[in-house]
């Protein structure tokens, strides 16, 4: 589990390609300039990542905090991240 959102330095714009381990669909390239796509990518990475380097590569801490209230996540994933990062819990409550 990432203990500091500041180390999440993934892209917030442009296109990215998720590896097969994270996304096994036909088209694995995603346009982060589309807000709905960006949220979907974040949801996917948060659900599927098992290694910290995957989180660091594809998530951005500031963007994660900004979109956190809008993400559709399993309760266990949301609770785990909010337990480790009170700022995310605060963002969800403020929304």
Image (cartoon, helix red, strand yellow):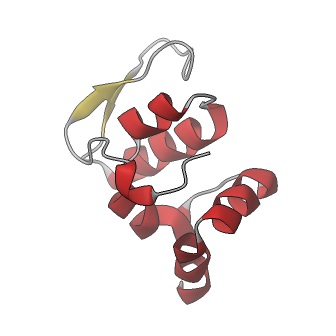
Above or below: residue 43 compared with residue 84: above
Nearest the viewer among 14 and 59 is: 59
Residue 11 horizontal/vertical position (percent): 26, 42
Out of 41 and 46, give the one closest to the viewer: 46
Which residue sits at x=40%, y=68%? 66
Q: Residue furthest right?
A: 76
Residue drawn 44% across the image and 58% down it: 5
Relative to 26, is 73 above or below? below
Residue 25 coordinates in the image, percent (x, y)? 54, 16
Residue 72 location, x and y as percent? 64, 56
| Left or right: 60 as drawn, with respect to 75 | left
Taking the image as shown, residue 81 lies to the left or right of residue 70, namely: right
- Does residue 86 sit above or below 26 in this rendering? below
Above or below, 26 against 60 in this view is: above
**Residue 74: % across, % down:** 76, 51
Q: Residue furthest left?
A: 14
Give residue 58's quadrant in the image.
Answer: top left
Residue pictured at 57% horizontal, 37% vertical: 44
């Amino acid at each position: 589990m990432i203990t500091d959102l500041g180390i999440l330095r993934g892209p917030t714009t442009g296109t990215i390609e998720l590896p097969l381990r994270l996304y096994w669909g036909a088209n694995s390239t995603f346009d982060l300039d589309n807000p709905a796509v960006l949220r979907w990518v974040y949801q996917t990475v948060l659900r599927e990542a098992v290694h910290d380097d995957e989180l660091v590569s594809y998530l951005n801490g500031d963007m994660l905090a900004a979109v956190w209230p809008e993400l559709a996540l399993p309760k266990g994933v949301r609770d785990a991240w909010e337990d480790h990062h009170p700022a995310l819990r605060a963002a969800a409550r403020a929304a």
